[in-house]
Image: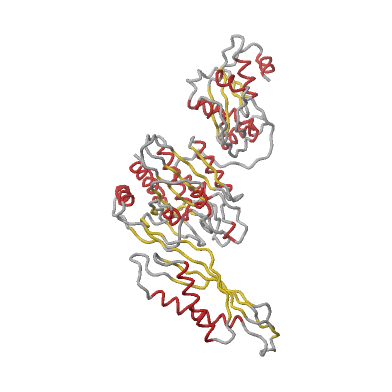
């Protein structure tokens, strides 16, 4: 290739040659050619943001294995630089740069406009030139008359058009996140795609800014992403936590992935719950990167909060911790310091199957279940009369689903009722089970042929943090300063991953954007609150991790 270039240039000496890098063998040949026999041509290496193996080795001054991400520039996606190429590259390269998938895609479009056919790896060199000519042309000695050679190493091939990771304001980033379908397949009932695509975008967005990135994927296709800005040491660490999955969009009124802005509101599934919170956290992290804080700042973009929350569980099981945490669920910019927990349960009411004409043989499980439901309703009213928690109120109980019977002309042998008990501090799975068994046992004694089987299901603990704790009270001062008003501390509706963080001894509270429509047919987040939340998170991190 380089011999052919010399022939085509017919004696002219290129000022700069830009070469894509995978394991580095091509770049080794380029450096060897243009740095030998008295040649002084500059050589610029280019890698994908998601796989900056050579770039990181050059920065760290040693050859080492690096984590490779996901990129449309698949031929450049390598985790190890060739040990033969490394001495040549480390000594002979003039510069090394990384480019995003979106930059490579844009460059391919430009090449196509002048009838040059290339694939994503082939677009990398032009993407690098576009970047250095805008930012570093004088450093590389480039002028309008310079001769620059771009090496194209891939023919056209199909690939999925990438999202632009250069967006650097929280509103635009929220739009990008909303436009990626991340419906939770475990709770959607409509085969949602999960978090793979949005996690890939977030990972690329972080890597484009040289932010340390970790990919967690214990459950295949359900990844979480962690971004970290390391402090210089000696400070406290802060975790910003948010979920990247959404509930289903089948019943959404209009395009759930539009990200449209109207009258100061950004619309789309997940805009409010809670992609705006994710966007604010990521922008805050990028802004913090330029500061020299003593403590670390982590942004955890987790999977599956809308179902079983295994994303935050996986994060914690992997050992990630912080001295304080903020969960950026939507709160209307109020501070949530407590929320209820829950216990799911299933009751099988056992009947006896028989022909519809044989009342003497059949036991109607559905009718027996009706008697349980009446008792459950009375029990729920009793719970509401109990002593209330100062801000959470009382717990509650309700039946969620009922299933029974097979056909009109048969006595049903089984009726299954699934229910939920919402809990407050002081409640436990054992106490919930005891209350249900008391009802069921009383029915067994009073109602002929009443038989049951109780199964306790998935549960989560309630959450509470003291308003006057050091972490919360210090954060309140920053929030007041940003908003210019007093801050409301309140209880939240629903359950959040805050309980899992608090269970590990991490002081935690919740704050997020203003808007409406969580799980509803129309959803939006207010533009002003997205900007305010970004300033709040940045300010808290600067103060807490200083």
Q: Residue visible at 29% across and 47% down? A: 481
Q: Position of residue 227 (x, y in %)?
A: 48, 42
Q: Position of residue 55 (x, y in %)?
A: 54, 28
Q: Position of residue 143 (x, y in %)?
A: 51, 18
Query: Taking the image as drawn, is residue 263 in sight?
Result: no
In the image: residue 91, left or right of residue 153: left
In the image: residue 332, left or right of residue 73: left
In the image: residue 239, left or right of residue 119: left
| Res 502 quadrant in image | bottom left
Q: How many marks?
A: 0
Q: Answer above or below: position of 262 versus 392.
A: above
Q: Answer above or below: position of 225 versus 150.
A: below
| Res 395 quadrant in image | bottom left
The C terminus, quarter of image: top left
Q: Nearer the viewer, residue 61 or 204?
A: 61
Q: Nearer the viewer, residue 115 or 202?
A: 202
Q: Position of residue 246 (x, y in %)?
A: 53, 55
State the residue lying farthest toward the top.
38
| Res 543 quadrant in image | top left
Query: Taking the image as drawn, is residue 170 in sight?
Result: yes
Q: Nearer the viewer, residue 254 or 539?
A: 539
The colour mode here is secondary structure
Q: Residue visible at 48% across and 60% down? A: 518
The N terminus, quarter of image: top right
């Amino acid at each position: 290739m380089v011999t052919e270039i010399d022939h085509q240039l017919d004696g002219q000496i290129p000022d700069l040659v830009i070469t894509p890098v995978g394991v580095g063998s091509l770049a080794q040949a380029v450096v060897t050619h243009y740095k030998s026999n008295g040649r002084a041509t500059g050589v610029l290496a280019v890698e994908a943001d998601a796989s900056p193996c050579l770039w990181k080795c050059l920065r760290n001054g040693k050859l080492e294995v690096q984590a490779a991400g996901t990129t449309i520039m698949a031929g450049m996606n390598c985790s190890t630089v060739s040990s033969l190429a490394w001495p040549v590259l480390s000594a002979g390269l003039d510069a090394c740069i990384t480019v995003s998938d979106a930059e490579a895609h844009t460059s391919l479009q430009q090449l196509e406009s002048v009838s040059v056919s290339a694939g994503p790896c082939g677009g990398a060199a032009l993407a690098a030139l576009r970047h250095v000519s805008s930012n570093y042309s004088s450093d590389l000695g480039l002028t309008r008359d310079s001769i620059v050679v771009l090496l194209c190493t891939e023919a056209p091939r199909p690939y999925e058009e990438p999202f632009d990771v250069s967006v650097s304001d929280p509103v635009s980033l929220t739009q990008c996140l909303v436009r990626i379908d991340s419906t939770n397949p475990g709770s959607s009932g409509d085969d949602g795609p999960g978090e793979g695509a949005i996690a890939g975008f977030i990972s690329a967005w972080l890597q484009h800014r040289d932010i340390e990135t970790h990919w967690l994927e214990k459950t295949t296709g359900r990844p979480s992403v962690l971004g970290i800005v390391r402090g210089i040491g000696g400070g406290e660490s802060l975790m910003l936590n948010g979920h990247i999955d959404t509930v289903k969009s089948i019943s959404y009124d209009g395009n759930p992935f539009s990200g449209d802005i109207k009258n100061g509101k950004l619309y789309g599934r997940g805009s409010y719950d809670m992609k705006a919170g994710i966007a604010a956290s990521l922008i805050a992290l990028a802004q913090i990167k330029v500061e020299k804080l003593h403590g670390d700042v982590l942004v955890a973009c987790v999977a599956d909060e809308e179902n079983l929350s295994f994303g935050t569980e996986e994060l914690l099981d992997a050992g990630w911790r912080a001295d304080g945490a903020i969960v950026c669920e939507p709160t209307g910019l109020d501070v949530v310091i407590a929320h209820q927990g829950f216990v799911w349960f299933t009751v099988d009411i056992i009947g006896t199957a028989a022909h519809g004409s044989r009342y003497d043989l059949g036991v109607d499980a559905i009718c027996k279940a009706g008697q349980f439901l009446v008792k459950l309703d009375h029990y729920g009213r009793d719970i509401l009369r109990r002593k209330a928690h100062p801000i959470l109120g009382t717990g509650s109980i309700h039946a969620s689903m009922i299933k029974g019977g097979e056909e009109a002309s048969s006595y049903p042998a089984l009726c299954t009722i699934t229910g939920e008990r919402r809990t407050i501090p002081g409640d436990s799975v054992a106490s919930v089970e005891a209350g249900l068994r008391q009802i069921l046992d009383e029915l067994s004694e009073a109602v002929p042929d009443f038989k049951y089987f109780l199964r306790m299901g998935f549960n989560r603990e309630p959450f509470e943090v003291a308003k006057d704790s050091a972490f919360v009270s210090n954060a309140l001062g920053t929030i007041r300063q940003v908003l210019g008003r007093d801050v409301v501390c309140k209880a939240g509706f629903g359950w959040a991953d805050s309980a899992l963080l608090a269970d590990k001894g991490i002081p935690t509270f919740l704050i997020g954007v203003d808007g409406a429509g969580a799980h509803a047919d129309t959803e939006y987040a207010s533009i002003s609150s997205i900007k305010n939340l970004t300033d709040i998170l940045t300010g808290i991190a600067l103060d807490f991790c200083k």
